[in-house]
Amino acid sequence: MSDQTVVDYHPMWAELGLDLPSHDALLGAVGQLFGDAYLTQDNRPKGMDYLNFVMSEVHGLRVKELDDFRKAGGKVVGTFCLYVPEEIIRAAGGWCVGLCAGAEFAYDQVEQIMPRNTCALIKSFMGFKLGKVCPYIQESDLVIGETTCDGKKKAYELLSELHNVYVMELPQMKRDKDIAMWRGEIVELMAKVEELTGKKVTAESLRASIKEVNDKRRALQRIAATRAADPAPISGKDALLATQVAFYDDVPRFTQMMNVLADELDQRVASGEGVAPMGAKRVLITGTPMALPNWKLHDIIEKAGAVVVGEEMCTGSRYYQDLVSEDAATLDEMVDDIAEKYLDINCACFTPNQGRLDDVVRMAKDLGVDGVIDYSLQFCNLYEMESNAVEQTVRDAGLPVLKITTDYSMEDVGQLSTRVEAFLEML
Amino acid sequence: MSDQTVVDYHPMWAELGLDLPSHDALLGAVGQLFGDAYLTQDNRPKGMDYLNFVMSEVHGLRVKELDDFRKAGGKVVGTFCLYVPEEIIRAAGGWCVGLCAGAEFAYDQVEQIMPRNTCALIKSFMGFKLGKVCPYIQESDLVIGETTCDGKKKAYELLSELHNVYVMELPQMKRDKDIAMWRGEIVELMAKVEELTGKKVTAESLRASIKEVNDKRRALQRIAATRAADPAPISGKDALLATQVAFYDDVPRFTQMMNVLADELDQRVASGEGVAPMGAKRVLITGTPMALPNWKLHDIIEKAGAVVVGEEMCTGSRYYQDLVSEDAATLDEMVDDIAEKYLDINCACFTPNQGRLDDVVRMAKDLGVDGVIDYSLQFCNLYEMESNAVEQTVRDAGLPVLKITTDYSMEDVGQLSTRVEAFLEML
């Protein structure tokens, strides 16, 4: 990558209808944030160079790839949630990208159409669209939403006035009949995506995409597993970035690069090399997703000398811990397997959601953590309501827990740092 | 009713485990509120005497009836939402009561287990339970919840640690397969209630309960229809109270008394008698439910000299505008009809929810309103998000609209009055 010449992407961004001055300002801010949070870390794995490069091209090379793909007739599907099965989209020849939702932007415009007390993730995705600074949604021929929460469910109605949107209905329980209902939604999605791409999903193409996406998740599982070591071979911030990038990078390339990183981490574990001293306080974070570039909490924790060793969140274990079975013989069986795998994700939108409580305790034990931080975006009713059970469960497992409710602003960094430091001291 | 002797219900309340001093304080506050809002009105219909009596016995006579019913082996089911089909419960021999959720109580305890920024309705029902001031939930052998919104869905998990709770899964769309799914939920509910009461639902019993509940809704429809007249023969406040009481009063008695009231209102319309002068400004309210004793907005509007002529809300037209078909021959067909009727309710939990927009415009025209007030409880993501479409639709129909977001506190009454008066002046 060292022989890259500097490419000017402005013509491409202009063609996508971005607001160039605003977009330049956004990229500048993200670059600054990344520099402060990431490039100041000591002893990072060499394998992180790839993710540094991806970040240096965050709205550049990957967008260019999508652009080229579409100009050659390919179709791109944008998503905001884990429940949209990438396997189906890829099996129909489409590409799937997670959309921008991790920074405050154009809130003034957003608050004209939705309440101020909407969670930051939703305000952010709407702000990126209204403010014309997200090249990924501009490259999305279709946005696939889901009915995971009240806020997103209704926000997709607003977004559908600005973009081509299709919404999947997620059930709210996990009984057999809910899985059957969800399977029906996947079949309908398949038809919708086939119509979009003009390509039929076949047993062969679906088998291949299941394998491909599983391989991506396996690579992330490998990275996650190394974090059980003390000293931790990779910072939480870097591991979080890997998951964030998983949502939009080229799948085979990302998988390959993450396996290279995992190899290096395995060697670090074998040789006892880490990013923090052995015995550094180890923290598990559980809660709402942290969309790129939301690194705030990890940064605070790790700058305070502790290390985040796991994320029980959508940008964490929920994304990669379960795989789709690769044993199916027929297309129908594969769809069964996909329906089942996706309902294994333990989002707080389900009632009850005991699986999440079990995951938190299991991860805390497997990763040898000293404490758990229960993280919620303000105004996320689902995770905020579930906090009570999460915190009780963690305490019952004999571990201290700190609850943090915040948003994407930087105004509370001082206050949060104080609280995190006090928490770490008592561990 | 004039020969009633004053009954001391304290022994009954004590037996139900209520916190007597707190409960006395609550009843005192509700009585005061009722006196100020209701008993100060001029020229009320005589038929309102029945509802005055019901309110004077708000935690008395009706609770005693439930108590007697249960002591004779009957079962009572508590609900918080329109989607729980009363017909099924009554057909199995049970009684259905709407539970308390319209006033601030024990918020200090509530905020220990759920976020401050939860809507007032949810905080209220949890506060009534935690504060031990709701005799109706104490008389409920089972509380039936539903997955209408994130807040309630998760709050039922918390409530289930304190009470016997069963949750129905409501779909989030209204396609044929959603109706089929919902039908399945009704069948499961039927089995659950049959198990509770020990009585089977039969075609005969269900036919009878469909008729009985339809009759209740028909009586409310009659009252609603008279409100199209100018002058309006009944205040909005009184009409609202009728719907609020419909949720928990004895069904045949309530229906009978509401038909007496409707007869009187018909006569008033014929003779041009009203509660406000002809030409008084006419307002339609649309939005989140107003659980008893939440009369705040109606009181403000009507004390400002306007009259509320309709409520497009769960404590309004959504409750009574649709009936279950009475043409079914078999139990299965009746269940089909119930599933269909209940999904006709246009709650903002559905996506899309065009039916509600159509209802608002139709009601505004039928009732000859001068303006619409879009009312949301703060932190209700669903209705707050839908506000944008509602307000646009109302404006497109050529009517002014005022958006009000509030809660159950009385702190903003002055500010709301100023806003409402300014709105009424420009009509």
Image (cartoon, coloured by chain):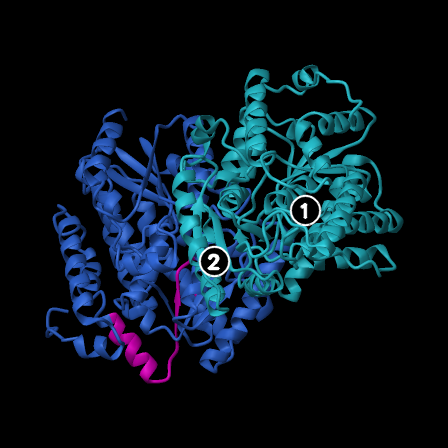
Chain colours: A blue, B cyan
Q: Which residue is at a point 75% across and 49% down the rendered structure image?
A: B262
Q: Nearer the viewer, residue B249 or A62?
A: B249
Q: Position of residue B162 (x, y in %)?
A: 58, 28
Residue A365 lies in quadrant: top left
Quarter of the picture containing the N terminus of chain A is bottom left
Asked whether residue B404 appears in the rendered view, the answer is yes
Helix, strand or loop at disc 1? loop
Q: Which residue is at a point 49% across and 43% down the rendered structure image?
A: B300
Q: Position of residue B401 (x, y in %)?
A: 45, 59
Asked whether residue B58 appears in the rendered view, the answer is no
Q: Position of residue A234 (x, y in %)?
A: 23, 46
Quarter of the picture containing the C terminus of chain A is top left
Return the residue at label 1.
Answer: B84
A379 above or below A164? above
Residue A297 lies in quadrant: top left
Tag 1: Cα neighbours inside 10 Å, few (<14), some, or many (≥20)?
Answer: many
Earlier residue among tags 1 and 2:
1
Disc 1, disc 2: CB below 8 Å? no
Q: Position of residue A415 (x, y in %)?
A: 22, 35
Q: Which mark is residue B256?
A: none
The magenta span reads: A62-86
Q: Horizontally, is B316 left or right of A414 in the view? A: right
Residue A244 lies in quadrant: bottom left
B113 above or below A261? above
Q: Is residue A82 magenta?
A: yes
Name the residue type under label 1: Val
Return the residue at label 2.
Answer: B386
Q: Horizontally, is B132 left or right of B212 in the view? A: left
Name the residue type under label 2: Glu
